[in-house]
Image (tube, helix red, strand yellow):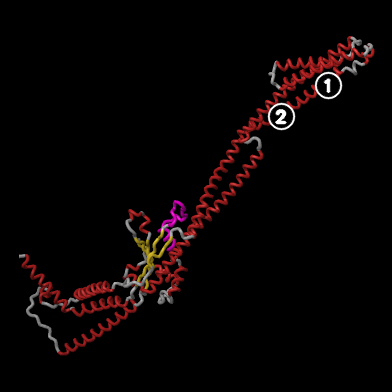
């Protein structure tokens, strides 16, 4: 039962829609034609845009990094960003615009900054994936990239794309050379600064060592050895001095005994040379006995004393024989003569006096030597005592020096590596850009997509026609059928009078139609002319209608 009531209602609605379209066909046709004509004119009159692109390959460093490590450590993408900033600079783009006579329609009206912005939007850089990213690493997908330019002419697009590609290759070489040279110059400046600081520290250390010469840590062993040698010399000198004092005391005692003997009797004869030698021999024997109580047979003084005893023994024997011969040949002198010759002819006394003088000299020299040795020992002991303090002070000074020297050596090695890397870049053995495919004229334009524009225009035209019909129906309040009147007013309708059309009405309707057709034709001409004026050489509108021409850096 529901189906029986819905089918007539649907049929009635379709019939009403058909009747409305039949009645409003002219009203729907006008916006349909206007919108369709406008979109079709724009699609037809819009200029075509062409894009050529040059493919650039990144050649890795030709010499293995195990032998020469490059100082250009920036990534490829960051370096491309830097190159793009330099190539897309205002002065560079204005030069390209002048060289290729770009944007002739805008050069009279637009400012240089607007021309530069327009060209930047027309340049497109795309990174092209090469192989499996996971198997070839992160940078493998950026080994190849393309540089494209969008222009209204395929020849202009090709020329500008090749120019931009050549600039990328050229500027990459210059950028790498600048970075390598900049690294080398920086290391050279750092090396000069560290060298100056190292020289200052060396001067400071040299001045400190010169000021405290003899107290330095490296001289401690030498000071200890010298101190030990001086102490040994002091012991020897003290022993020699002691023996000189003992000898002087012994000689003094002998002289005293001779004085006592001489004063007791004056009639004694003068001692002979044999007796003098015998007395000297007795003294040496006593001295040798004292030496042997303290030293061995190989001690130098013991050996020297024994040699003197041997010589004196030979002399005593010789003088004794000579005295016997003289006594037999000459008469005995009287007592007075012997007494007169005692003092001047007593060689024994003279020998004792000479030995006493020598002993005094030795004792005096021993005192001086002992004082000198004690002064030297005090000096070297002071140096040894001051060595720990000097070692601590010198360690504080040399600590910074060692650090600076290690830094200098490190910078020196890095500077040499940087110079080699700079030479590598100058010889173009590092990472370089190579044009893999030069730009060629494209086979078909990049945009706009005219078929898509026509389809969009057709949809918009149908929508405009439907909107006009709906609006007209909502504004019109007249009743055209009896059912509408009965539905609106609850009064009985007795009869419906059909529309009566006279000849004048038909003529008036014909005139209205001719005027409407003329107006529609004129309107279409105006729409088409406006579309031509808007779309002719309108690159901005092409960019809006063709999103692929938007300036991007696609990865």
Q: Which of these two is toward me, 17 or 455?
A: 455
* Residue range highlighted in magenta: 61-84
Q: Which of these two is toward me, 392 or 417?
A: 417
Marks 1 and 2, Cα distance to the nearest angstrom?
A: 32 Å
Q: Is residue 280 above or below residue 455?
A: above
- Residue identifier under label 2: 375
Q: Residue drawn at (80%, 24%), measured in percent from left and top?
A: 361
Disc 1 is placed on an element classified as helix
Quarter occupied by the C terminus? bottom left
For disc 2, the neighbor class at 10 Å (few under 14, some 14 to 19, many from 20) is few
Image spot of residue 164 (x, y percent)? 42, 67
Q: Which of these two is toward me, 80 or 241?
A: 241
Image spot of residue 98 (x, y percent)? 45, 73
Image spot of residue 45 (x, y percent)? 31, 78
Q: Residue drawn at (75%, 25%), measured in percent from left and top?
A: 366
Image quadrant where residue 64 sits: bottom left
| Residue situated furthest left in the rendering | 1
Q: Is residue 127 left or right of residue 232?
A: left
Image quadrant where residue 371 sits: top right
Q: Is residue 72 above or below residue 550?
A: above
Disc 2 is placed on an element classified as helix
- Residue identifier under label 1: 354
Work out whether residue 252 can be spotted: no
Quarter occupied by the N terminus? bottom left
Q: Is residue 155 above or below residue 204?
A: below
Q: Residue drawn at (74%, 17%), measured in percent from left and top?
A: 288
| Magenta span includes 62 | yes
Q: Are marks 1 and 2 in contact (CB under 8 Å)?
A: no
Q: Residue drawn at (70%, 26%), measured in percent from left and top?
A: 233
């Amino acid at each position: 039962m529901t189906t029986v009531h819905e089918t007539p209602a649907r049929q009635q609605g379709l019939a009403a829609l058909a009747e409305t379209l039949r009645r409003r066909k002219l009203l729907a046709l006008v916006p349909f034609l206007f919108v369709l004509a406008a979109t079709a004119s724009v699609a037809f009159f819009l200029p075509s845009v062409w894009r050529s692109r040059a493919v650039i390959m990144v050649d890795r460093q030709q010499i293995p990094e195990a032998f020469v490590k490059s100082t250009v450590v920036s990534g490829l993408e960051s370096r491309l960003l830097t190159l793009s900033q330099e190539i897309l600079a205002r002065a560079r783009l204005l030069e390209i615009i002048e060289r290729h006579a770009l944007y002739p329609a805008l050069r009279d009206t637009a400012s240089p900054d607007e021309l530069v912005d327009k060209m930047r939007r027309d340049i497109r850089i795309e990174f092209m994936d090469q192989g499996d990213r996971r198997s070839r690493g992160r940078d493998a997908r950026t080994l190849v990239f393309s540089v494209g330019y969008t222009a209204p002419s395929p020849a202009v697009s090709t020329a500008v794309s090749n120019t931009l590609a050549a600039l990328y290759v050229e500027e990459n070489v210059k950028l790498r050379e600048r970075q390598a040279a900049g690294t080398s110059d920086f290391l050279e400046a750092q090396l000069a600064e560290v060298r100056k600081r190292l020289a200052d520290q060396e001067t400071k250390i040299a001045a400190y060592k010169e000021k405290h010469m003899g107290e330095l840590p490296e001289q401690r062993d030498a000071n200890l050895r010298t101190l030990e040698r001086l102490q040994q010399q002091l012991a020897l000198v003290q022993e020699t001095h002691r023996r000189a004092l003992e000898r002087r005391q012994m000689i003094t005692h002998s002289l005293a005994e001779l004085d006592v003997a001489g004063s007791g009797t004056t009639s004694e004869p003068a001692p002979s040379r044999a007796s003098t030698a015998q007395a000297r021999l007795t003294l040496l024997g006593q001295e040798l006995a004292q030496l042997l109580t303290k030293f061995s047979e190989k001690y130098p003084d013991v050996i020297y004393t024994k040699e003197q005893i041997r010589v004196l023994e030979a002399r005593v024997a010789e003088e004794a024989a000579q005295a016997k011969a003289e006594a037999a040949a000459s008469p005995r002198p009287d007592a007075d003569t012997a007494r007169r010759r005692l003092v001047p002819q007593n060689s024994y006394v003279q020998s004792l006096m000479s030995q006493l003088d020598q002993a005094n000299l030795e004792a005096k020299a021993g005192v001086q030597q002992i004082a000198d040795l004690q002064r030297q020992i005090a000096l070297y002991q002071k140096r040894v005592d001051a060595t720990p303090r000097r070692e601590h002070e010198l360690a504080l000074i040399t600590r910074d020096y060692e650090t600076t020297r290690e830094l200098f050596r490190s910078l020196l090695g890095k500077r040499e590596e940087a110079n080699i890397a700079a030479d590598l870049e100058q010889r173009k053995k590092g990472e370089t850009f190579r044009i893999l495919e030069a730009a060629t004229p494209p086979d078909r334009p990049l945009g706009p997509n005219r078929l898509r524009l026509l389809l969009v225009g057709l949809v918009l035209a149908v929508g405009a026609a439907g909107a006009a019909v709906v609006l007209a129906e909502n504004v019109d309040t007249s009743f055209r059928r009896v059912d509408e009147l009965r539905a609106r007013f609850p009064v009985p309708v007795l009869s419906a009078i059909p529309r009566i059309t006279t000849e004048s009405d038909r003529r008036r309707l014909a005139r209205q139609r001719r005027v409407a057709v003329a107006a529609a034709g004129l309107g279409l001409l105006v729409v088409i002319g406006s579309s031509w004026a808007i779309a002719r050489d309108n690159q901005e509108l092409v960019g809006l209608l063709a999103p692929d021409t938007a300036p991007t850096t696609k990865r």
